Image (cartoon, grey):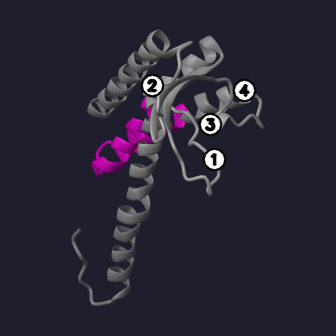
Amino acid sequence: MLKYLSITAVLVILDHATKYWAIVSLKGKPYWPADGSLFRLDYAENYNMIFSMSFIPMPLVNTLAIIAMGLLFYLLYQYKDQHPLPSIGLAFILGGAFGNIPERLIRGYVVDFISFDWPDWLFFTRWPTFNVADSAVNVGMILYLGYVFFIEGKRDQVIAETSDSGDGESAVL
């Protein structure tokens, strides 16, 4: 489990280092690069939750996030001796949570600074500004859910099909 928690620690350090850099280098300045049509670094303070949505009060969001972190630790412990993919995914999600939650509790907002253009026909003119912690949560979710739906689900299906065959033999995975 320690190797997965080290992934979490590296992500937290990277997230806080890049946020510090954004505060020092980008705050109060125009975005970089100046043309910034596809990609730009643009300092932003997010006082709400994901995508700056504000339909849930922040104290409740913070409380639920702390509870979710406990659940993530429990899941990481459960998967620690199994396939590494869900553990890596959970470590990424924890890294993102530890990147953003303390910042929300201490500052009252999260520093965001990465911005990409998004096709105008979709939901946003530009994708909402984000940070390393947000990226870690998304990558972690993709890894974890990819494992649950495509690897664990297939394994369970093969086991069920093998046990239903009735020939007395079992498949080894």
Res 50 label: 3
In this figure, which residue is indicated by the disc labeled 2? 32
Distance, label 2 to label 4, CA atoms, is 30 Å
Label 4 is placed on what type of residue?
A: Met
* 74 lies left or right of 54: left
- Membership of 73 in magenta stretch: yes
Mark 2 and mark 3: span between their CA atoms? 23 Å
> Circle 4 — which element?
helix
Q: What span is colored magenta in the figure?
A: 69-98
Amino acid type for the residue under numbered disc 3 = Ile
Q: Residues within 10 Å of mark 1 (few under 14, many from 20)?
A: few
Q: Which residue is mark 1?
A: 124
Q: Looking at the picture, how far across and down is residue 28, in whole percent? A: 56, 12
For image coordinates 34% across by 68% down, the residue present is 155
Tell me how far mark 4 sits from mark 1, CA to CA.
23 Å
| Quarter of the view holding residue 105 | top right
